[in-house]
Amino acid sequence: LNSEPAPPPIDDERVSLSAATDAAMDKQAAAAARVAELKSQEVFIKRSKGIHQCKNCNYEYVESLGSTEIGGEFPPGTPFSSLPSNYRCPTCRASKDSFFEVTEEVAGFAVNQGYGFGTNGMTGGEKNTLIFGTLGALFVLMLGGYGLS
């Protein structure tokens, strides 16, 4: 019924446009592979904050403060892991396994964490405080210089 000729079969191999285009596509594919390799190497370190939070009521057991609420007397510095297995949340009476550890994330490559002036092991919030605190101090210093004249 249709008088149009059928299109030629498509080869599964890459169609060669030109040598320059092929080289550009190869370069782009190599760059994408390098990006994927670097992303796979980036490891986010989870560092414990020494806080365990109840999933039910958001009560926080802070290891540096201990706990003097219902359930026993635990002096400051008592790790959560050394609390008895029958420890319960003093607020909602949930069991010990209802708590999860609060962690902070340190971004960057794991192999680079030990380099620099200690800033590679800082969290994003700590870096922001350092940067903007320094800028604020320099601003106050500059205003002080204007005040002297």
Image (tube, rainbow, N blue to C red):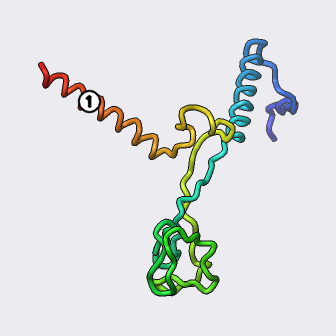
Q: Is 59 located above or below residue 123 in the figure?
A: below
- The quadrant in which the C terminus is found is top left
Q: Position of residue 138 (x, y in %)?
A: 30, 29
Q: Is residue 142 visible?
A: yes
* Nearest the eye: 34 or 117: 117
* Nearest the eye: 35 or 4: 35
Q: Residue under circle 1?
A: 139
Q: Is residue 139 left or right of residue 122?
A: left
Residue 13 lies in quadrant: top right
Q: Is residue 89 left or right of residue 32?
A: left
Q: Position of residue 80 (x, y in %)?
A: 58, 72
- The quadrant in which the N terminus is found is top right
Q: Position of residue 105 (x, y in %)?
A: 56, 51
Q: Is residue 67 left or right of residue 18?
A: left
Q: Amino acid at mark 1?
A: Phe
Residue with the most extreme front position: 75
Residue at the spot x=71%, y=36% of the render?
Answer: 36
Residue 37 lies in quadrant: top right
SS at mark 1? helix
Q: Position of residue 3 (x, y in %)?
A: 81, 34
Residue at the spot x=51%, y=46% of the render?
Answer: 123
